Image (tube, rainbow, N blue to C red):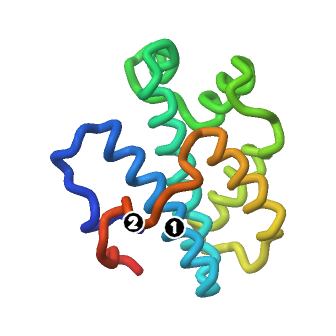
Amino acid sequence: MPHFGLIDENLPELTKFLLRARLHVRGGKIRLERKRINDGIAALYDALIYALYWFFLKDDELEPLLYDTYGKYKDELDLYKILIALGKVDREFNIKSFIKLSESALNKEVKYFDQVQILLNYDHLMEQLGILPFDEELLPKGVPTTL
């Protein structure tokens, strides 16, 4: 994944999640440009998951809503529904379709997808979550071991 070898594991969890989300957005888009569709989608999916975790963890009022009854992180669909219900994000992003697309990508089954429309809506959501835009100069330097 786009963060291997670039994130200091001694950083606070909140910082690691933000860096991971941003590195995966960057890495996912690089992969898409290189026609590595499945790898690109998988990286963007990972970025979304960590963006959601980060968004909940950075807010004292939202943080308790991150966990299920067993103390584990809720899945991305549940987290997204919570954010919609609270008015933190709008409904422009079809997360269910993106999850299906991501599952297909993880199985290396995606040959084509509506990249322009999906990325437009994806970027809009990532802006609402505070992941985009970001300054490239603030991200760790170097090339991840998987690019």
Which comes sooner in the sequence, label 2 or label 1? 1
Mark carried by residue 96: none
Please tell me how crowded label 2 is: few (under 14), some (14-19), or many (20+) other residues with Cα within 10 Å: few
Percent of width and height locating residue 39: 54, 73
Report the residue at 60% width, 29% height from top: 79
Would you identify the image quadrant in which residue 114 lies? Answer: bottom right
Mark carried by residue 137: 2
Report the residue at 80% width, 69% height from top: 116
Q: Is residue 112 left or right of residue 38?
A: right
Q: Secondary structure at mark 1?
A: helix
Q: Secondary structure at mark 2?
A: helix
Report the residue at 73% width, 79% height from top: 111
Q: What residue is shown with label 1?
A: 26
- The front one of 87 and 1 is 87
Q: Image quadrant for the N terminus?
A: bottom left
- The front one of 131 and 106 is 131
Q: Image quadrant for the C terminus?
A: bottom left
